[in-house]
Amino acid sequence: MSCDDNYAYDLRPIRHKDCQAIWEILKDPQVQSFNDYKSDLTKGDVYDFIQGDIEGFYNQQGIRLVIVLRSNGLVIGSIGLFNIIDGQGVLGFELASHYFGKGIMQKVLLEFFQKLNVFITTPVDKVHAIVQPENTACIKLLAKCGFELNNELWTKYIT
């Protein structure tokens, strides 16, 4: 579940009290350069996103989990599957820039897919990820986790 003892983590469903931590991650310029959120993202916007994530989970149309360091309870990122329709969903994730390059997200992605049917009961057989071509680190990560480029979308087939 973790890269080593310093980066041991847990995944849990997102909640409203995670708003501040997620907002701080998303407004980091290094993180912001690779996501599709607007640059003037407010804490209220993030609260609304979290509310949508919670509603999506209850409707079984998606899930967002936060990545929490075991050592101190710090939220360092999130991962989610959204817009689940006809067995397909869209993957999204972010990680605090301080933790880039430490192998955490690869472990998180592998665990997320291994336990997907525990997190959500809606059948999913295909997951898409939209990645900017210049985000080479993300592309390498997705390839390591079984995604393939298919018509400008990175796709993973769940078996």
Image: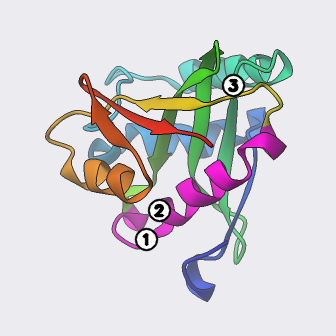
**Structural distance between the alpha carbons of marks 2 and 3:** 20 Å
Q: Give residue 51's position: percent from left, percent from top.
A: 73, 20
Instruction: Name the one closer to the observer, 111 or 16.
Output: 111
Boundaries of the magenta span = 98-119
Residue 110 is a magenta residue: yes
Q: From what the image shows, is residue 55 above or below residue 104? A: above
Q: Give residue 13's position: percent from left, percent from top.
A: 77, 42
Q: From what the image shows, is residue 122 above or below residue 135? A: above
Q: Quadrant of residue 64?
A: top right
Magenta segment main secondary structure: helix
Residue appearing at x 73%, y 39% in the figure: 14
Whichever of callouts 2 and 3 sits on the residue coming sooner in the sequence is: 3
**Residue to which mark 3 is pinned:** 62
**Structural distance between the alpha carbons of marks 1 and 3:** 25 Å
Disc 2 on helix, strand or loop?
helix
Label ID, residue 106? 2
**Residue to which mark 1 is pinned:** 103
Query: Do labels 1 and 2 touch, CB within 8 Å?
Result: yes
**Residue type highlighted by circle 3:** Gly
Residue appearing at x 51%, y 33% in the figure: 91
**Residue type highlighted by circle 2:** Gln
Of the 4 image quadrants, the one containing the N terminus is: bottom right
Whichever of callouts 1 and 3 sits on the residue coming sooner in the sequence is: 3
**Structural distance between the alpha carbons of marks 1 and 2:** 6 Å
